[in-house]
Image (cartoon, helix red, strand yellow):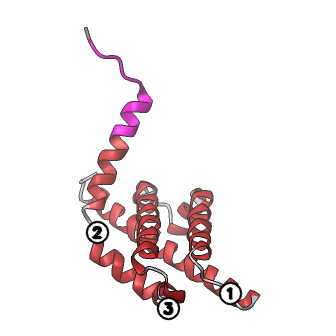
């Protein structure tokens, strides 16, 4: 007798396989360096454990990278980056809000509304950096037929 599988299971298996391939393209050291580059002063605030804050940033960066990679097929098919980003606006906004809230949880306090807004934009640029990186590497993989 054959095992019956659903299309959802097959799609999920295929997605996981693709994500594993994409994750081979980045290193943990690169992730850590970018986190320190974007959020260096915020990681050292109030005597908090740097590793704990850094780990959360790494998780969100990986999610943003995989989100960009999952939309790379549209870039390969000829859509420009801005149009593709409008497709995943909700997911991207969720990641930005998650990262911002994560820092607030760990004690990054803003003195003024202007300071809070600039920190939010810093979180947005961090997510955008990793989204673009995943998007561009995914397009390269499609061009080389490695998908």
Q: In the shown orientation, is residue 113 left or right of residue 76? A: right
Give the x, y percent position of residue 49. Answer: 44, 79
Q: CA distance from mark 2 to mark 3?
A: 24 Å
Stretch of the chain drawn in magenta: 2-13
Q: In this rendered view, identify the residue nearer to me: 70 or 45.
A: 45
Name the disc covering residue 41, or none.
3
Q: Secondary structure at mark 3?
A: helix
Q: Are marks 1 and 3 in contact (CB under 8 Å)?
A: no
- Residue 23's place in the image compared with 105, above or below, is above
Q: In this rendered view, identify the residue nearer to me: 58 or 126.
A: 58
- Residue 54's place in the image compared with 84, above or below, is below
Residue corresponding to mark 2: 26
Q: Earlier in the sequence, mark 2 or mark 3?
A: 2
Q: In the shown orientation, is residue 141 left or right of residue 132? A: left
Q: In this rendered view, identify the residue nearer to me: 101 or 17.
A: 101
How many discs appear?
Answer: 3
Q: Tell me where residue 76 sits by quadrant.
A: bottom left
Give the x, y percent position of residue 81. Answer: 50, 68
Determine crowd level at label 1: few under 14, some 14-19, many 20+ residues with C-alpha closer than 10 A: few
Name the disc covering residue 110, or none.
1
Q: Tell me where residue 52 sits by quadrant.
A: bottom left
- Residue 2's place in the image compared with 16, above or below, is above
Kindly identify the residue that appears in the image at 49 percent across and 91 percent down.
Answer: 41
Q: In the shown orientation, is residue 78 left or right of residue 98? A: left
């Amino acid at each position: 007798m054959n095992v019956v599988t659903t299309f959802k299971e097959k799609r999920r298996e295929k997605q996981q396989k693709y994500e594993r391939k994409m994750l081979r393209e980045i290193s943990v050291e690169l992730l850590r360096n970018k986190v320190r580059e974007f959020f260096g002063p915020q990681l050292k605030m109030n005597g908090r454990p740097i590793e704990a804050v850094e780990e959360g940033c790494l998780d969100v960066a990986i999610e943003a990278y995989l989100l960009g990679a999952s939309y790379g097929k549209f870039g390969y098919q000829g859509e420009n980056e801005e149009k593709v980003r409008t497709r995943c606006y909700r997911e991207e906004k969720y990641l930005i809000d998650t990262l911002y809230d994560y820092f607030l949880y760990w004690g990054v306090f803003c003195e003024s509304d202007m300071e809070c807004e600039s920190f939010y934009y810093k979180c947005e640029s961090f997510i955008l950096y990793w989204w673009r990186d995943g998007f561009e590497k995914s397009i390269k993989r499609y061009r080389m037929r490695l998908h």
